[in-house]
Amino acid sequence: MNTNTALTNMIKQQLRTGDVLDEEILDLFEQLPRDEFVPTAYKDFAYSDMQIPLAQGQTMMTPLEEGQLLQSLQLTGEETVLEVGTGSGYLTALLAKSCKKLISIDIYEEFTHQAKTLLDKFAIDNVETITGDAHQGWMEKAPYDVIVLTGAIEKVTKSFKLQLMKGGKLFAIVGQPPAQHGMLFTLDNDDSWHEKIIFETSIAPLIDKTKHKEFIF
């Protein structure tokens, strides 16, 4: 199957069928060739309805998960966004095309380096890629209008909430596998939090280097 056919099928059979109907978001999927961002061994699966394995035991969300995540944020192009977990760099590119400024952080340099190369290739110049441990956010660039966590966490900590502007949004994948939920948390101007489940999933956890490895006897 050629790339154009695979892309068309992805948009029709995955995104539209999964209620991703925002034309601007669908246009982004057409503009940014997903197969450029996946590992070489998975090029043929770039437009498939599957989570693609990445290096370091990480995974790339499905196209539908990426689309639903992006649609839930309702970005206007004026936001400063923090992305924790750069991964393949594809969601990074989608977010960057939708916001004013994006700070994308990953603990693995190979991901931030690869993302920077691809972002440059597609002339996306509103992203600052940083290699570092952002499992509690990134205080030195805070506050943010939007925070996106691409790895799973057990619960949203106060640290993240403190880095969000009033009226801001935080997307996180919450829970233990196999029952995890992609959730949107919104902070209103009265300091009240609201939450909504966007999709069900199972994905690799957000890496926390401060956690001691459990001993196995």
Image: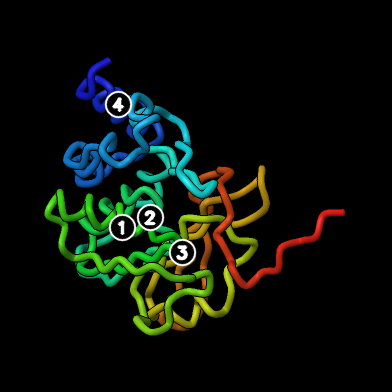
Instruction: Give the residue type at disc 2.
Output: Glu
**Residue 81 appears at what percent x and percent y?**
32, 68
Element on which disc 2 rests: helix
Earlier along the polypeptide chain: callout 1 or callout 3?
3
Dot 1 surroundings within 10 Å: few (below 14), some, or many (20 or more)?
some
173 in relation to 158, above or below: above
Secondary structure beneath label 3: loop
Mark 4 falls on what kind of element? helix
Q: Who comes first in sequence, dot 4 or dot 1?
A: 4
Of circles 4 and 3, the one toward us is 3
Distance of label 4 from label 3 (alpha carbons): 35 Å
Other residues around mark 2 within 10 Å, as few (<14) / some (14–19) / many (≥20): some
Residue 30 shown left or right of residue 155 in the figure:
left
- Where is residue 17 drawn, in percent x and y? 38, 29
Task: Check disc 3 and report the residue beneath it.
Answer: 107
| Residue that carries the numbered disc 1 in the rendered image | 113
Amino acid type, residue under disc 3 in the picture: Ile
Q: Is residue 165 left or right of residue 102?
A: right
14 is higher (above) or lower (below) than 196: above
Type of amino acid under label 1: His
Q: Are marks 2 and 3 in contact (CB under 8 Å)?
A: no
- Nearest the eye: 127 or 78: 127
Label 4 or label 3, whichever comes before in sequence order: 4
Write down the residue under mark 4: 12
Q: Which mark is residue 8?
A: none
| Mark 4: few/some/many CA within 10 Å (<14, 14-19, 20+) | some
The N terminus: image quadrant = top left
Q: Nearer the viewer, mark 2 or mark 3?
A: 2
Query: Which label is found at residue 110?
Result: 2
Q: CA distance from mark 2 to mark 3?
A: 9 Å
Identify the image quadrant of residue 4: top left
